[in-house]
Image (spheres, grey):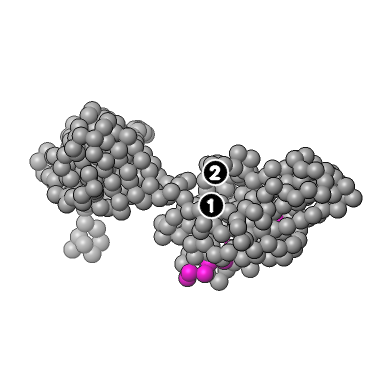
Amino acid sequence: MKSTSMLILASIVLASGCGPKQGAGTTPEKGAAATEGAETHGAGEVGTVEFMGVRYSVSAEPFKGAGGWGVGVKVVAEAVDSKDHAFVNDKLEAEGEPTALRFDTAHMSLETLSPGSPVELTRDFPDPGKMGLVPGEGLGLTVGVWGIEDAEGGQRFSPNLAHISMTIMDSGDPTFTVTMLDPGEDPPPDFISYDIGTHQLVIKPFYPYKQKVVTKSGENVTVYEVGDTIVRIKGDEIVVGDKHYGTLPKGEPVLVDHGKVIVASEEREGKEIIRPKLLEFYANPVSEHKVGDYKVVVSPGAEKFGVMSSGETYTLILDDKELKFEEEKLYINGVSYGKIKKKATVEIYFGDISIGDKKIEPEKTGEDAK
């Protein structure tokens, strides 16, 4: 069994209402009522729930320190669906948990949860150096695992697994319960909505927290990227992916649902669109770059770019491409494209590379050159 501290792995969420909120001997406001019919355990006992292919076992023990009472929490996560699951670094706060504690997972030593290799997460609450609970005080503590997803790209969601309630009696002894929750009872929203003029655009799927969401605007063009879904709106025309879906009637809603395009409650079939027309639906259709004695023209235009030079060697960064001009040779991502004359213009058009009207290909090497 692998074991790692949550202060390193940073995957447990503890949302606390710690403080003098409840009188001695009173019943905590949260706890068993958090989920009707939920399984309730005493100190040290274990409850188990499964969510999206991962089994979570939760246990907790009260402990008495120099500054008062605290809680030691342990969660064992185990993949049960024969898939690897990824730990996701995300600092976003969950709605409704303003006191949730999050930790930076940039230095995690553990990246995946694999079948047959359970991971143990542990943490004490309150944090070291913080005052514990004294007679007359109580807490409601929500325990959840932040950011375990299907490594193939499944839903990214932080499930709440258990609720811990503890009250310190006048005698100095704690009353303590661990109530298991059902993370499937309150699933996250699976869509994102935009208002576009008179239209409402809804895109599915949208997995909250850590989902890639990008909005770009150009001249009369707005681009919405939600995960792998790309929607382009120009005036009243709509393009999804690389297909044209016609014009949008004024005031009608638009739903893009897992690749299906539904306008005014009717599903539409997309039509292939030629590259020059498709280029009109990019927020940045063309970008031009001066690199030493050369010029580079990119369509669609690069979103991120920069030039570096060392002597007569120039390197141009264009999004995911690196163009190097060295000794009158062109290299793209380390692959040679042969000699090019000075003052030449290199054109990159939807990935095709040409000089003038001549398309160029990588130079053949080794067996390919024979």
Tag 1 secondary structure: loop
Q: Amino acid at mark 2?
A: Ala
- At x 24%, y 58%, the residue is 365
* Majority secondary structure in the magenta region: strand
Disc 2: which residue: 94
Q: Amino acid at mark 1?
A: Ser
Q: CA distance from mark 2 to mark 1?
A: 8 Å
Q: Which residues are magenta?
A: 73-82
CB contact under 8 Å: marks 2 and 1: yes
Q: Is residue 340 magenta?
A: no
Judging depth in this view, the residue of 356 and 87 nearest the camera is 87
In this rendering, the count of numbered labels is 2
Judging depth in this view, the residue of 312 and 261 nearest the camera is 261
- At x 64%, y 50%, the residue is 142
Query: Is 327 on the left-hand or right-hand side of 114?
Result: left
The answer to whether 288 is drawn above or below residue 74 in the figure is above
Q: Is residue 12 visible?
A: no
Q: Is residue 80 magenta?
A: yes
Sequence order check, earlier mark of 2 and 1: 2
Query: Is 29 on the left-hand or right-hand side of 351?
Result: right
Where does the image place residue 1, in percent across and percent down from the top left?
A: 63, 68
Give the position of the C terminus as an image quadrant: bottom left
Where does the image place residue 267, in percent across and percent down from the top left?
A: 21, 51
- What label does residue 158 carry, if any? 1
